[in-house]
Image (cartoon, grey):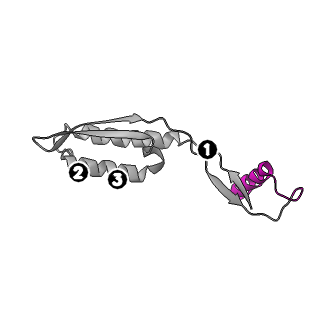
């Protein structure tokens, strides 16, 4: 068994765009007549968006401001958090051996080929 490092991956620009559009919808509903304004419901909507777009939402810091007198959300803001690119480690087991042990670059290449085929 040989530990290999997974390549870091970026989130899809399409997913980022969809997440931003959904947040805009929630923010634009605040001043509208029948839009969701109650603070707890707005927080619930944002929580569901975070569930739906897990890969994207973890890169954003979302804040909701609340009017204490009326218990309504007044504004929603979000900003992109800078984070390290995650690199995972996984173990590869193979019966293919080079010089007594499977070399890491070759093992990673074999693993990527298997993923492309499967």
Characterize the local packing of mark 2: few (<14), some (14-19) or many (20 or more) Cα atoms within 10 angstroms. Answer: few
Mark 3, secondary structure of its residue: helix
Q: Do we see residue 118 in this rendering? A: no
Q: Farthest left residue? A: 69
Residue at the outermost right position: 99
Q: What x and y, as percent, mark residue 109?
A: 76, 50
Q: Is residue 81 above or below residue 112?
A: above
The earlier-in-sequence mark between 3 and 2 is 2
105 is within the stretch colored magenta: yes
Label pair 2/1, CB-CB below 8 angstroms: no
Q: Nearer the viewer, residue 14 or 109?
A: 109
The x and y percentages for residue 56 are: 46, 44
Q: Which residue is mark 2?
A: 41
Residue 55 position in % (x across, y down): 48, 48
Q: Earlier in the sequence, mark 1 or mark 3?
A: 1
**Whole-percent x, y for residue 33 in the image:** 16, 41
Instruction: Point out the stretch of residues depicted in magenta.
Output: 98-118
**Towards the viewer: 19 or 64:** 64
Q: Which residue is rendered at x = 64% and y = 53% of the image?
A: 89
Residue found 28% across the figure and 52% down from its top: 44
Magenta stretch: dominant SS? helix
For residue 89, say whether it is visible.
Answer: yes
Q: Quadrant of residue 118?
A: bottom right
Q: Check the picture and name the quadrant holding the N terminus.
A: bottom right
Q: Residue at x 53, y 43 (%)?
A: 11
| Mark 1: few/some/many CA within 10 Å (<14, 14-19, 20+) | few
Where disc 1 sits, the SS reads loop
Is residue 103 inside the magenta stretch?
yes
**Which residue is tagged 1?**
8
């Amino acid at each position: 068994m040989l530990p290999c490092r997974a390549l870091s991956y970026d989130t899809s620009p399409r997913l980022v765009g969809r997440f931003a559009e959904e947040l805009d919808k929630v923010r634009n509903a605040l001043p509208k007549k029948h839009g969701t304004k109650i603070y707890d419901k707005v927080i619930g909507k944002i929580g569901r968006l975070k569930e739906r777009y897990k890969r994207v939402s973890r890169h954003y810091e979302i804040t909701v401001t609340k009017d204490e007198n009326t218990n309504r959300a007044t504004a929603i803001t979000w900003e992109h958090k800078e984070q390290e690119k995650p690199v995972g480690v996984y173990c590869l087991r193979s019966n293919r051996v080079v010089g007594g042990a499977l070399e890491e670059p070759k093992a990673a290449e074999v693993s990527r080929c298997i993923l492309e085929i499967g």
